Image: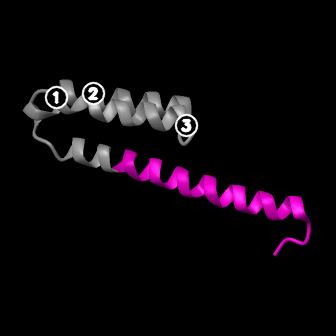
Amino acid sequence: MANIKSAEKRIKQTARRQQRNRSVRSRLRGALKAFRSLEEKDRAQALPAAVSQIARARKKGVIHKKAAARYASRLAKRSAKKG
C-alpha cells in the first residue's frame, strides 16, 4: 500500500476510473454482441444504437478514436451486406 498521501489519492482515483471504464466497455460489448446476433433484415434498425454506444465509449476515452471508427465501419459493412 502507498505511504504517500498523493499516492493514496491516485489509487482511489484509478479505482473509480477503472470502475467507470469497465461499465462503459461492458455496455459497448453488449451492444456489439446484440447487433451481431440479429438477422440481416433487423440490423439496419439496430445500427444507430450500436454506433451510438461506440461513439459514447470513444467520447469517454475508453476506446481509441481509430478503434471506434474501425468498429463502426465493420458494423456498417455487415449491416449493408446482403445474404
Q: Which residues are magenta?
A: 1-29
CA neighbours of label 3 inside 10 A, class few (<14), some (14 to 19), many (20+): few
Mark 2 vs 1: CB contact within 8 A: yes
Q: Measuring from the top left, give residue 61's x and y in whole percent.
A: 58, 38
Earlier in the chain: of badge 2 and badge 3, it is: 2
As drawn, the label of residue 45 is 1
Q: Quadrant of the N terminus?
A: bottom right
Residue at screen point 37% across, 29% down: 72
29 or 5, nearer to the observer:
5
CA neighbours of label 2 inside 10 A, class few (<14), some (14 to 19), many (20+): some
Q: Amino acid at mark 2?
A: Pro
Residue at screen point 79% across, 59% down: 9
83 or 62, nearer to the observer:
62
Q: Which residue is mark 3?
A: 60
Q: Measuring from the top left, give residue 38's x and y in whole percent.
A: 14, 42
Instruction: State which quadrant residue 46 falls in.
Output: top left
Q: Amino acid at mark 1?
A: Gln
Q: Amino acid at mark 3?
A: Lys
